[in-house]
Image: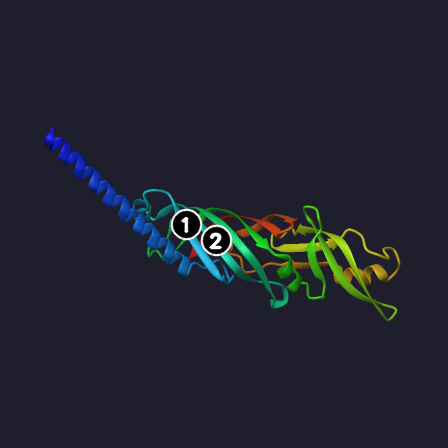
Amino acid sequence: MRVLRIFVIIGLILAGLFVAADRWAVGYAEDEMAAKVRLGQGQAGGTTVDIHGFPFLTQALGRELEQVDVRLTGVEAAGADGRKMRISQLDASFHGVKLDSDYTGGTATRVDGSALVSYDDLTKTSQNGATIAYGNAPGKVKVTATVEVLGRSITRSVVSTVTLGEDGRTVRVRADEVPGEGIPGVEGMIRKKTDFERRINGLPEGIKLSGLTSDAGGLHLSLDGRNVTLAG
């Protein structure tokens, strides 16, 4: 009985040491990945990584991770005409990550996630002096712009619908209706200021924007992808 008790104690100690070693290893791997991870051409201000699944060491030896969650903040993604489209926060979950033989990167069979673009950052990409704010309804924004009419500067706000382009990379803003609609020349003049679209480049190959809505916090984009490379 005493011998059995000793074996049990030794087993518990060894199990505890294994768990401790496994947690240290996953923490080290998360820190290393956070320092090196690159998502396409986008540059991030901050990165955190969370590797799921236990034990981590057996996953690493088998070179396949169950799930890796990556959070990027302050992402500078290339936009239209070389302008930067800043994404306040991007959360992506990489499922079934198969690591390269040298552990310098991997490929995820499936990716899902979300991204947040603030109205301040969307305003900076408008290129026409328009100001973007929440339109008090999901999928709506308020666009305020100044136009020149008969030598006078007139500032107007319109409620616009924000949608996602079929290419899965373009955000489109179009006014539901504008002052002077139907008057030759006036509608086009106002829409030139209020309507615009911005293509978000720099996301990894295989990831597209699959959905879009808006609330008081900004534009919320849904991400979707297959066979996506996770460099670093």
Residue 229, compared with residue 16, is above or below; it is below
Q: Earlier in the sequence, mark 2 or mark 1?
A: 1
User: Where does residue 21 sit, x and y in percent of width and height?
Assistant: 27, 48
- Residue 149 visible, this angle: yes
How many other residues sit within 10 Å of disc 1, few (<14), some (14-19) or many (≥20)? some
Residue 191, compared with residue 214, is above or below; it is below
> If the image is split into quadrants, where does the C terminus sit?
bottom left
The residue at the far top in this view is 1
How many other residues sit within 10 Å of disc 2, few (<14), some (14-19) or many (≥20)? some
Q: Quadrant of residue 193?
A: bottom right
Residues 228 and 60: in front is 60
Residue with the mark numbered 1: 50
User: Where does residue 43 sit, x and y in percent of width and height?
Assistant: 50, 63
Residue displayed at 86% across by 57% down: 180
The residue at the far bottom in this view is 151
Residue displayed at 24% across by 42% down: 16
Residue 152, compared with residue 51, is above or below; it is below
Residue with the mark numbered 2: 71
Residue 130, compared with residue 110, is above or below; it is below
Residues 225 and 48: in front is 48
User: Where does residue 189 sit, x and y in percent of width and height?
Assistant: 81, 63
* Residue 147, label in figure: none
- Given the image, on which type of amino acid does mark 2 rest? Arg
Tell whether 120 sits left or right of 96: right
Indicate the secondary structure of the residue bearing disc 2.
Answer: strand
- Given the image, on which type of amino acid does mark 1 rest? Asp
Would you say the residues marked 2 and 1 are in contact, meaning their CB atoms lie under 8 Å apart?
Answer: yes
Residues 98 and 18: in front is 18
- Residue 232 visible, this angle: no
Residue displayed at 63% across by 55% down: 170
